[in-house]
Image (cartoon, rainbow, N blue to C red):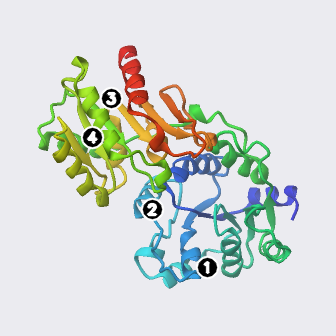
Amino acid sequence: MDQTGIQNKIKNARHALVLLPMALGDFTYWQLVLRAFAEQYPQLRLDLMPDEYFINTRFHRGSGALVNPIICDWAAQTGIFHDVYADLYTGDSEAALTRAKKVGYDVVFVMSSRGRLLVAEAARALFPRAAIVSWSLRERWFKFGADRRRFAKAVDFIVPENPQRFKKIIQNYNYFFQTAARMPTYDWAERAELTVPAEALERARRWREERGIAETAPLYFINPFAKNKKRTWPLPKVAALIRALSERPEFQQAVFLINGLPSDQDAIAALIRDEQLPRAYGFTADQGFWDLPAMLAHSRLIISVETAIMHIASLLHRPQIILMRLKNPEWVPVNEKELRIIWNRKRRHHIEDIEVTEVTEVVEEIINEQ
């Protein structure tokens, strides 16, 4: 199928399915692009299915090895999707797949960043009458002609690699639908918004109240953790940062939140106790997705490594400092007005090489400007 053919197919479609990797940073931008796509084609019923299910079952990892249920909750609340198929992980997966087959999808979009060939073949097997649309295979991962022949057999239209893919990642996502579905090129900084529900903001207020944190106390939200250890800032440096800032007169009322997963909380608690950090607390969004953006919305300044939190903070238009590696400039948040970036310029690309003094200097600059 050529480009005009797939564009007409999408224009006349009634049911479309998106197979998407459920990573929080990726979804932060995908949901903006998919909302624009749904607005462009209001006649289309758009559904979402996490692609990890097919990758995990192929490698016998168990159906729920990678999926983030928090993202499924957020996706279900966006109003973009008719069905999210979260029960692939939380319920009867066969029943979920049977339900999907009955819809009669006209178009299936394969957005997978890894396992793309496997997911495309699974989509073809499940939805033999649908037009399958996918990114092209990445050359460094699929060097053999047999893989490419399998991919061509599974996919009806292949979106070629964006020649400008090292610009903003959201522009890459825009390019996908621009190519396949005539989506306009948007100014995503203007569309980058996230509205936190009032009940989530109230939960964040109560969280502060329960710990005796005054409503007037400025919160400094520090996120040092990432899945990749190369993107993690060491806890001893977090302690040194808090101690250095606490000694300054303008930070005498400041409260520091150290964010992490539930599995990180023991280490955070030990750090606060052993280092005797003043007005420092561990924080984790363990009650649902909105607890995280709600606490970010309460914060005067966010300091984060290169992970999803910097993208959520960008959509909330909160001031932030980001510790980033030069190798990933396309992941700079879409809204740059409220952020400062401290780049790690060393060749080995480890965030831990960024020094505490570099961060304190930028914090002071921001506070003096506010």
Q: Secondary structure at mark 4?
A: strand
Q: Earlier in the sequence, mark 1 or mark 4?
A: 1
Identify the residue under disc 4. Answer: 257
Residue 72: image tag: 2
Tag 2 near tag 3, CB within 8 Å: no
Q: Residue at x 72, y 51 (%)?
A: 176
Q: Can residue 217 be seen here?
A: yes
Q: Position of residue 273 (x, y in %)?
A: 16, 46
Q: Residue at x 38, y 32 (%)?
A: 356
Quadrant in which the N terminus is drawn: bottom right
In the current view of this chain or complex, which residue is farthest to the top? 368
Q: Earlier in the sequence, mark 3 or mark 4?
A: 4
Identify the residue under disc 1. Answer: 101
Q: Position of residue 98 (x, y in %)?
A: 56, 82
Vertical placement of residue 353 versus 357, above or below? below
266 vs 320, nearest the viewer = 266
Q: Secondary structure at mark 3?
A: loop
Vertical placement of residue 134 versus 98, above or below? above
Q: Residue at x 56, y 45 (%)?
A: 349
Identify the residue under disc 3. Answer: 300
Q: Can residue 218 be seen here?
A: no
Vertical placement of residue 277 versus 288, above or below? above
Tag 4 near tag 2, CB within 8 Å: no
Q: Earlier in the sequence, mark 2 or mark 3?
A: 2
Q: Earlier in the sequence, mark 4 or mark 2?
A: 2
Q: Is 350 on the left-hand or right-hand side of 154?
A: left
Q: CA distance from mark 1 to mark 2?
A: 20 Å
